[in-house]
Amino acid sequence: MPYTPLVTVKHRIALGQALPFNVLDASHALMLAKGQVVQTAHQLELLFQRGALVDLQELLTPAERIRNAPREALPGLWRFCMDDLHKALGHCADEHFPAALEQASQPVLALVERDPDLAIFQVMRQEANPLMQYGMDHALHTGITAALVARRLGWSDAEQERAMKVSLTMNVSMFELQGQLASQTTPITPEQRQAVLAHPEFSARMLLLAGVTDTDWIKAVLWHHEVQDGSGYPRGLRDTSDLANLVRQADIYTTKLSRRANRQAMAPDEAARMVFMQDPKSSMINAIVKEFGLYPPGVFVRLMGGETGVVVQRGGSVKTPIVAVLTDGRGQPLSSPQRCDTAEPGYGVAAILGEAGHGPRQPGAAAGGLICG
């Protein structure tokens, strides 16, 4: 484990304030724990003279730790970071919300950058959370999707971060209502519909009250349901921003992938076909389809030979993913998953399966309208 002399990071120490890391002696034994306080310059100089050390790992930001983490640690990091985002969103009315969201979103952006296939897996393999939690879950999935598509479109790091933050906060004023709507099987009431129509303005107002000062962020939240033909809400605007449009498209796509009490989640090839047919010439919609493909990581499929497995990686085209094969053509479990490139002759995808690999649904016509290889 690498160490560095304390003197090399003295700029990270503020006298009279909590230490941001542990301080060790020359034998790597603990001298001062993280959070303890060095009160005077003389005390600090004594630590330097004694050869005090700091573990380099403690100097890394959460995002830097993710970039350096072993590959096998990434799934666990995803779970941890998604939990942190949930907690941050749960305090959206707090004055410290902007800083908390910044701290929680940076590691997720690093995870998206580190392994986009695993990021897509988080969107597709949605946890079986209570439907009352739908609002926050949907915000996270939309945020990941928006960040992925912004990367594909060549947006800057700052623009990718803003796209994720807009997605995470577009519905902060109606998380609870979203849970109710996802759970109920009765039609939406007039009162609920009015709240839905008003949520962009209320969400923007909540962010302003919480201390968000980024006007592009606020405007995109306000405009994320506006449509170029003027049919959107709350103001029927025709001219908004690329940021608002990207978030709207990511919102629409991920909504189709999510289950509710009165409907199952839509299969990804069908969701891709539906968003594509809305506007086949849209660069953003094409970016979504190309980013996720027809068979995204996390989807169970049956191959042409009868084998079943789960998509683990995107392939050379939207129709040819890499699959971890779990059963042979007779349905017998394999001793260990076998990697399969569905671009190879005879190994194409024959059907998308339901949860846990059951319940086939033929992709056929759903894939036919897409020419985005």
Image: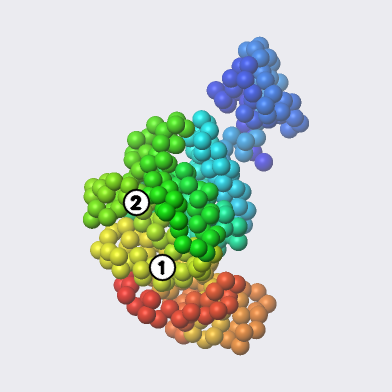
Residue 165 sits above or below residue 371 on the image: above
Tell whether 202 sits left or right of 178: left
Q: Position of residue 107 (x, y in %)?
A: 53, 45
Question: Residue 372: x and y, percent?
Answer: 32, 69
Which amino acid, by three-letter code, is at mark 2? His
The C terminus, quarter of image: bottom left
Q: Mark 1 = which residue? A: 271
Label 2: state its secondary structure. loop
Three-letter amino acid code at the position of disc 1: Ala
> Measured from the top left, where is residue 294 in percent x and y?
42, 70
**Residue drawn at (53%, 54%), measured in percent from left and top?**
179
Residue 25 in view, yes or no: no
Asked whether 174 or 207 is in front, the reply is: 174
Rendered position, 181 above or below 42: below
- Front residue of this view, candidates 323 and 31: 323
Are the residues at dot 2 and dot 1 in contact (C-beta closer than 8 Å)? no
